[in-house]
Image (tube, rainbow, N blue to C red):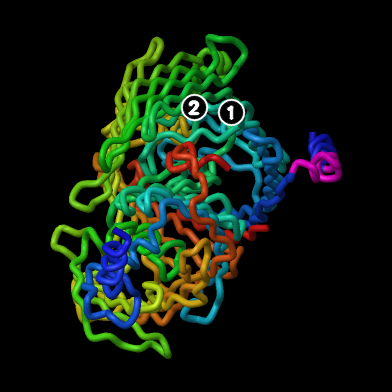
Amino acid sequence: MRSKIIIIISIFLLSPLSRAQQVEFFGYYEPQFLGIAVNDGSIHLFTNKLRIDLQSTGYENVTFAANFDFINYSGLKTWNFLYFVPDDIAASVHPTLHNYYRFTYNDSIFLDNAYVKITFPLFDLTLGRQQISLGTGYVWNPTDLFNYKSLTDPTYEQPGHDAFRLDAPLSSRFNFSLLYGPEKDWKSSKKLARIKGGLGHFDFSAIFIEMREESTDSFIEYWFGSEVNNYRRRLFGGDMVGEVLGLGIWGEFAYNRLEDRDNFNEIDAGLDYTLDNGLYLLAEYYHNERAKNDYREFDLDDWLEYFMAESKTISRDNLYFYLDYPLTDLIHMNNSIVGSLNDGSFALIPGLNYSFRQNIDIDLFLNLNLGEDLKAYTAEQGQGGILRMRIYF
Amino acid sequence: MVLKEFFKIIMLAPIISNSGHSQELTADDIIRRFNDLMTQPTVKSISRMTITTTSGNKRDFVMESYSADRGDKNLIRYISPTRVKGQTILMLNNADDIWVYFPRTNRVRKLATHAKKQKMEGSDFSYEDMGSGDTWIDEFESTRLEDEEIGDIDCYKIELRKMPESQSGYSRLVMWIDKSNFMAVRIDYYDEDEPDLHLKRLVLSEIRDIDGIPTATRMAMTDIQDNTNTIMEYSEITYGAEIPSDLFTERGMKAK
């Protein structure tokens, strides 16, 4: 696979076609060190990531874009989910089953995005592996079933998804989108319809998504395989963004209808403001009926679903605060607090961003879980930090 | 009839004339003339923005800009550096509505009005400075002060004070406008809450005649409080270019 991709890139780079069609190459190199203190020990993982983007706009009304990611890891590459769940819950797993919860960070080269966008007078057609970004929330997006945002860095780029997408403008501020994400058959494939509009200082949208998904059930998966847990999910939702009295506000709502399972609602609401001294403040609330509101009922599957990003939170009602302040014109300090309103536990995520050179950024994040045992943001999940440099070219 | 027309021209000449009869022009007249220069029906440009930070570091940005409806609609797309390449800012309604498109996440984010006052990509220009359209006329009251010379340029000096309903981030502005061509050569910006606190100074220079329109091809904005400086230099400016209206939409932001 790796050699095939290198050959494809080489052919593209050397091809007279690439020069004739005004292909641009750019990207970044990103070394990252991750350290976590957990279970009286520590984990170190060093990651090298090289992303190469190419974009061709040589044909009128046709854009081709792609990016390849090369990622390798060193340090402790094989982890176990049980390191991060509360000790009492990990202890409930029989030692002979511990290996079942292991996962390994494997070196990889993959095609993250590759799509062609054709612009017609009345609509745009995008075919191929592409980013699909939905919703107005900063940390949580109930209407986005395609991506999962990291609490430490919600703005980090998301992976591409195979899809055929049609976007049709209906007026200057209204547009309509249809998306089909092919899987093995029609029934399994992802379908999306969305209408987005604007009125005054507000934008809003209504969305429908149908897809099949899997959820983690440690017992069933171990004995019967994951197919058992594959079910249909239909989402009916909407979002809005605008402002009231100078405050930026946004909201998202999703009603999730599941096959053979309990339906559930998700609500997200947030606001932000920037003070004259440059201090940016943001607050966001997320209600997730899929999650439990009593931490004493959290079981292994709840934790696994959370770590596998099948549920966006483990706790039902969550609050997120974020502030960003420019210490100098090149250094920004930020701090997030994410907490559960149900059990009162919380985590602190302080960070620094330094614009070291024109095309070099350095980021430092810490993730300090400060909650009591068994709670949503329990200290038993460990305390970690990320030091990351990104060099754009 | 011909004689009548001749007399009409003679009578009107002192009012029309740009120089030597400045006492007849009110502050409103002068600001409108300057505003007309700055808010052409359509403008397309490529510019380089160089930010000098407090520590003396420099950051260079190259961007293409499109403006329509006399500055009411503005779109700015970064060409370089790679860190922000493709990032696009759409400003409508004199920058009362701002959207930013981030190509790395394929996400469009709508900014609230408070963002108008914020620095654009860390520069000394705010979003409001870049997309204010007719704000100087619609949201400020102008008063003519005593004429002054800036260097060897004879200037009208005008003070603009914010109207109560305005959402501008400045309480007042003071402009020095060249009597010969009605192009401002200096603008001072004052704090929203403290009208005596001098925040920034914009110096417009290298004024060239492009399609008969005097155009400042170099603008230097200095933040007096932070001691930082941003220079905007235009390499290409086209007036009256045909700009499709759907450029100023979400589709237009994602067009490249």
> Along the line of sight, which residue is nearer the eye, B255 or B142?
B142
Which residue is disc 1 drawn over?
A: A126
Q: Is residue B151 left or right of residue A202?
A: right
Name the quadrant containing residue A161. Answer: top right
Which residue range is magenta in the image?
A10-21
The residue shown at (36%, 55%) is A336
The residue shown at (64%, 32%) is A115
Please check whether the numbered discs 2 and 1 fall on a single chain.
yes
Q: Which mark is residue A216?
A: none
Name the quadrant containing residue A342. Answer: top left
Is B126 above or below relative to A272?
below
Question: Does A43 appear in magenta?
Answer: no
Q: Is residue A59 left or right of residue A386?
A: right
Whichever of callouts 2 and 1 sits on the residue coming sooner in the sequence is 1
Percent across and percent down for residue A2 are: 80, 38
Percent across and percent down for residue B162 are: 19, 67
Q: Which mark is residue A167?
A: 2
Majority SS type along the magenta span: helix
Number of residues whose C-alpha sits closer than 10 Å to that of mark 1, classed few (under 14), some (14–19) or many (20 or more): many
Q: Quadrant of the C terminus of chain B?
A: top right
Task: Give the CA distance from mark 2 to mark 1.
Answer: 8 Å
Is A218 above or below relative to B70?
above
Query: Number of numbered discs present?
Result: 2
Q: The disc labelled 2 sits on which kind of residue?
A: Asp
The residue shown at (40%, 86%) is B153
Q: Are marks 2 and 1 in contact (CB under 8 Å)?
A: yes
> Along the line of sight, which residue is nearer the eye, B125 or B69?
B69
Percent across and percent down for residue B36 are: 35, 61
